């Protein structure tokens, strides 16, 4: 940075009040549901009922929930590696996981 340029102040994160409580609760509920499905898939894998490998993404539920909230219904999603969370967050049947 040149001496004549001033540093821009960092943008602060949005205040929690900027996200309505109902939205925050919905995002949290989605994270819990995703965690449950992922845990269930792992349990089935350990029982040798799911063949192949198990690429879990436990701890990344908030990424998928936020991602899904930002998407429009007609947006496309391309999941490659550890995409279970994103698929569930976009509306895939959670009932089929249990």
Image (cartoon, helix red, strand yellow):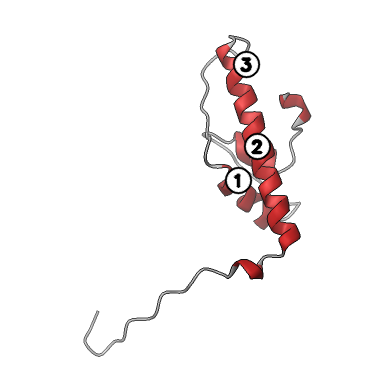
- Residue at 53% x, 29% y is 56
| Residue in the picture at 61% in, 29% down | 38
Q: Do the residues labelled 2 and 1 touch (CB within 8 Å)?
A: yes
Of badges 2 and 1, the one in the foreground is: 2
Relative height, residue 52 to residue 22 (above, below): above
Task: Mark 2 or mark 1: name the one nearer the start of the chain.
Answer: 2
Inter-mark Cα distance, 2 to 1: 9 Å
Instruction: Read off the residue under disc 1.
Output: 64
Query: Which labelled disc corresponds to residue 3?
Result: none
Which marked residue is nearer to the observer: mark 1 or mark 3? 3
- Quarter holding residue 20: bottom right
Q: Measuring 62% from the left and 16% from the top, which residue is drawn there?
A: 44
In the displayed structure, does residue 63 sit left or right of residue 28? left
Q: Classify mark 1: helix, strand or loop.
A: helix
Task: Give the percent coordinates (x, y) of residue 62.
Answer: 58, 48
Label 1 crowd (10 A; few <14 / some 14-19 / many >=20): many
What residue would you read off at disc 2? 34
| 24 in relation to 88, above or below | below
Residues at discs 2 and 3 in contact (Cβ within 8 Å): no
Q: Which of marks 2 and 3 is nearer the N terminus?
A: 2
Look at the image and tell me whether residue 12 can be seen: yes
| Image-based side of 12 in relation to 65, left or right | left
Label 2, label 3: how many angstroms apart (C-alpha)?
A: 15 Å
Q: Where does label 3 land, which residue?
A: 44
């Amino acid at each position: 940075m040149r001496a004549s340029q001033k540093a821009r102040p960092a943008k602060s994160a949005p205040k929690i009040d900027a996200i309505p409580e109902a939205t925050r609760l919905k995002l949290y509920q989605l994270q819990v549901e995703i965690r449950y499905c992922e845990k269930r898939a792992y349990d089935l894998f350990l029982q040798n009922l799911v063949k192949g490998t198990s690429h879990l993404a436990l701890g990344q539920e908030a990424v998928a929930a936020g991602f899904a909230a930002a998407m429009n219904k007609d947006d496309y999603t391309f999941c490659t590696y550890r995409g279970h969370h994103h698929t569930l967050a976009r509306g895939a049947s959670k009932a089929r996981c249990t």
